[in-house]
Image (cartoon, coloured by chain):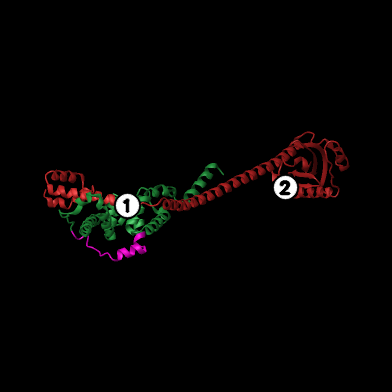
């Protein structure tokens, strides 16, 4: 048997047995750990559930990594796994069960009123109020707002993560912002 | 353009999603429109506030290590599996290569001894004096080898057979001394080579049996510490018959 044949055989065994991408999963996924955890915590509103969600996400992602195509958006892929895992979890089902479906695509995007409470937020002492207002948002508003503002995802990335058209991303994001301002107004009135 | 037109584009603008030319037009509009400027400012403030508030939760180092260990534990298993398979293929290939080389070498060496025996036989026939002791009497030929080769052997009684003894000579196979006996059956001459088995051990892989080398029929066997080769252009049956007589004499 020639050396070339031997090398060819070894190579084919190596290639056929595992995805060539499997080595890079940790390198790609671990840098997203902090932000995925943050996102998971916002979704679950609970540290323990967030840890479970992140752990399950990583296990699922590793298992399905062979189906991930290099060159496509890995971050969006990871967030999608996390979100889908959340939505099918007990906490996720509980949160989404009470959220009414709004006609987001059929309604025009409405601009905000002039007298909004944004200026109050310049004062850092009111940050807790904002956090609370975000927590109180329905999950589909909360997630899109966090993906846009905190994760700084583009509309395209959000569209890939949430599996919705870009038009829906725009209208839902607009409504999420409106809902937040509204909720913040209520918080300020209470305070 | 009117504020109504830009109202629907306030969010895409602050999100950096407005096309470049539209952004440029909008910025021109913003320079002259206090209402839209105020709306953009409040959106930017809100965006900034959410960014700060949104980065609220940090995983513990312990949790990070736990997940990382879990990933690493799952990945190396695949590596090990791959390495095991690769090692298995490598080991199998090496064993196959070594075995193949050994078998090939054995065949080559085995072939070489028959070729050498055939050469000795042919060169003897081609010689003007093929044997050094010319006699059909086994009791003459056998003693002639005393002191010339380091072993002795028995020759068969040929009176009741078609074979006749022509004579004998000392010969060498890979520097091992031996006896070459020339027999005749009808017009065919057959060489019988006798060597000490010890003198050939390790030099040639030999197995008893019949064969054909360069169109010669041959037979070889080991008996009483001696290695016998019978070779000639006679039929395989004649070769076997002579071999049988020699075996009987040697027993």
Residue that numbered label 2 is attached to: B207
Q: Magenta span has B63? A: no
Residue projecting furthest to the top? B128
Q: Colour of chain A?
A: green
- Residue B56 - label: 1
As helix, strand or loop, the secondary structure at mark 2 comes to loop
Q: Colour of chain B?
A: red
Q: Left of B14 or right of it: where is B177?
A: right
Residue B51, image x, y percentages: 27, 50
Is B69 in front, or is B126?
B69
- Residue B3 - label: none
Residue A186, image x, y percentages: 21, 59
| Dot placed on the residue nearer the N-terminal end, 2 or 1 | 1
Is A45 in front, or is B82?
A45
User: Can residue B214 be seen here?
Assistant: no
As helix, strand or loop, the secondary structure at mark 1 comes to loop
The boundaries of the magenta stretch are A85-107
Instruction: Report in which chain the residue with disc 1 lies.
Output: B
Dot 1 alpha-carbon crowd within 10 angstroms: few under 14, some 14 to 19, many 20 or more: some
Is B179 in front, or is A62?
A62
Point 86% across, 36% down: residue: B147
Tag 2 and tag 1 share a subunit: yes
Residue B22, image x, y percentages: 18, 46
User: Can residue A45 be seen here?
Assistant: yes
């Amino acid at each position: 048997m020639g050396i070339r044949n031997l090398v060819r055989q070894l190579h084919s065994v190596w290639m056929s047995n595992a995805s060539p991408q499997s080595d890079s999963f940790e390198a790609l996924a671990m840098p997203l750990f902090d932000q995925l955890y943050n996102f998971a915590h916002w979704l679950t509103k609970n540290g323990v559930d967030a840890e479970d969600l992140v752990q399950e996400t990583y296990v699922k992602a590793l298992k399905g990594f062979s189906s991930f195509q290099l060159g496509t958006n890995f971050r969006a892929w990871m967030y999608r796994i996390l979100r889908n895992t959340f939505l099918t979890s007990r906490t996720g089902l509980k949160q989404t069960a009470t959220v009414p479906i709004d006609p987001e695509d059929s309604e025009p995007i409405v601009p905000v009123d002039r007298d909004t409470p944004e200026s109050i937020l310049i004062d850092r002492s009111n940050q807790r109020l904002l956090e609370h207002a975000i927590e109180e948002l329905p999950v589909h508003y909360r997630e899109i707002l966090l993906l846009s503002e905190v994760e700084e995802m583009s509309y395209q990335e959000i569209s890939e993560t949430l599996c919705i058209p870009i038009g829906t991303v725009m209208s839902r994001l607009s409504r999420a912002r409106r809902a937040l301002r509204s909720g913040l107004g209520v918080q300020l009135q209470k305070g | 353009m009117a504020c109504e037109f830009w109202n629907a584009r306030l969010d895409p603008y602050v999100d950096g999603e407005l096309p470049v030319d539209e952004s440029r037009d909008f910025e021109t509009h913003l320079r002259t429109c206090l209402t839209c400027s105020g709306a953009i400012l409040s959106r930017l403030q809100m965006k900034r506030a959410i960014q700060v508030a949104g980065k609220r939760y940090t995983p513990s180092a312990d949790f990070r290590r736990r997940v990382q260990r879990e990933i690493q534990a799952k990945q190396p298993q695949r590596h090990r599996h791959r390495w095991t398979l690769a090692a298995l293929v490598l080991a199998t290939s090496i064993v196959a290569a070594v075995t193949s080389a050994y078998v090939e070498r054995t065949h080559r060496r085995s072939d070489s001894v028959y070729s050498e025996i055939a050469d000795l036989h042919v060169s003897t026939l081609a010689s003007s004096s093929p044997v050094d002791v010319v006699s059909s009497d086994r009791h003459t030929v056998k003693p002639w080898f005393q002191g010339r080769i380091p072993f002795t052997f028995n020759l068969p009684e040929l009176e009741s057979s078609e074979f006749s003894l022509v004579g004998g000579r000392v010969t060498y196979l890979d520097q091992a001394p031996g006896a070459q006996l020339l027999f005749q059956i009808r017009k065919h001459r057959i060489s019988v080579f006798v060597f000490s088995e010890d003198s050939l051990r390790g030099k040639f892989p030999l197995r008893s049996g019949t064969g054909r080398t360069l169109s010669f029929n041959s037979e070889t066997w080991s008996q009483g510490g001696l290695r016998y080769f019978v070779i000639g252009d006679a039929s395989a049956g004649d070769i076997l018959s002579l071999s049988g007589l020699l075996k009987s004499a040697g027993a």
